[in-house]
Amino acid sequence: MSSPKASRLVVISGRSGGGKSTALHVLEDLGFNCIDNLPLRLLPELIKQLVNDSPGQRFAISVDARNAWSDLPRFPQLVAEANAHGIYVEILYLDARSPVLVQRFSETRRKHPLSKSGMALKEALGKERELLQPVLNMADLVIDTTTLTLHQLRDLVQSRVRTEDDAIMSVQVISFGFKRGVPVDADFVFDVRCLPNPYWKPELRAHTGLDQPVIDFLNSEPDCQQMLNDILAHLQRWLPKFEQGNRSYMSIAIGCTGGQHRSVFIAQRLKEALQSQHKKINLRHREIDRT
């Protein structure tokens, strides 16, 4: 664990269009000294500054495919050097599904950094993923921005980057629908599709797991309480072990078919049960938030 006086370095990376600039602006608002697209060959100089000239300072840098291709494979070695000097390093990797990235480039009419070499956009996105693999392999937190609004992304980054109480693990509980895919940043995934489905009750279909009629229905089902108890027992047993292992972030995903009823209900109850033991916990209902 880092001490309150330890220097901190947050590395923001990911494919172009994934939200790196937004994340860097959030950290700047939180008081970090931010450097966009720092050439990795200059990172040793920044490490030296953090050790000798700016102990206790907080820096955030973005690292992307604009770096010299020969520099990116050295990234793990550079992080190891920073850790060896007592610098607390966190790596956040932001990405989205390729069709969404293509759409974002189309809407903004921006050029992809690799397109200067004559690559088509889809090819450039694939090459970019390949180049950034050394960074992705070391990421402490991977954020899928495919379905996030700008406001949601800012809130998520702000809630998950630890600015104080460094010994406290940040926990996110997220409900989702399997028909839209499993969240890529999930550490635990629990499938609650075996529970009674309010969707098949005409009077409940238009409601969500946040509404009292659905809550009353699911509370009356013994299997729902048993599922909740089993998931809670598992998390109460193992979350402290991850925290003791210096884990910074933990994402717990609860999924049902559409992400409207059962997963929302269970995720809500889990967050309520866990918040007395985990100071930094937040809740997101993916399918409800996107509507």
Image (tube, rainbow, N blue to C red):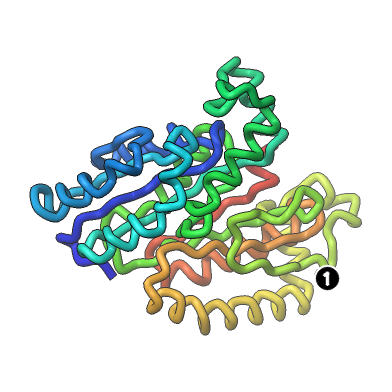
The front one of 53 and 118 is 118
Residue drawn at point x = 52 percent, y = 27 percent = 113
Residue 96 position within the rendered picture, expressed as x and y whole percent measured from the top left:
62, 41
Which secondary structure, mark 1? Answer: loop
Q: Quadrant of the C terminus?
A: top right
Q: Residue furthest left?
A: 53
Establish if 101 lies above or below 258: above
Residue 177 position within the rendered picture, expressed as x and y whole percent measured from the top left:
75, 53
Q: Is residue 3 visible to us here?
A: yes
Residue 159 position within the rendered picture, expressed as x and y whole percent measured from the top left:
41, 50
Where is residue 24, by image quadrant?
top left
Q: Residue furthest top?
A: 109
Residue drawn at point x = 49 percent, y = 76 percent = 239
Establish if 22 lies above or below 277: above
Residue at the disc numbered 1: 194
Horizontal relation, residue 197 to residue 104: left or right? right
Q: Quadrant of the N terminus?
A: bottom left
Residue drawn at point x = 63 percent, y = 35 percent = 125
Establish if 266 lies above or below 97: below
Where is residue 128, by image quadrant?
top right
Horizontal relation, residue 250 to residue 254: left or right? left
Horizontal relation, residue 183 to residue 76: left or right? right
Identified by mark 1, the residue type is Cys
Q: Residues within 10 Å of mark 1 (few under 14, many from 20)?
A: few
Horizontal relation, residue 173 to residue 67: left or right? right
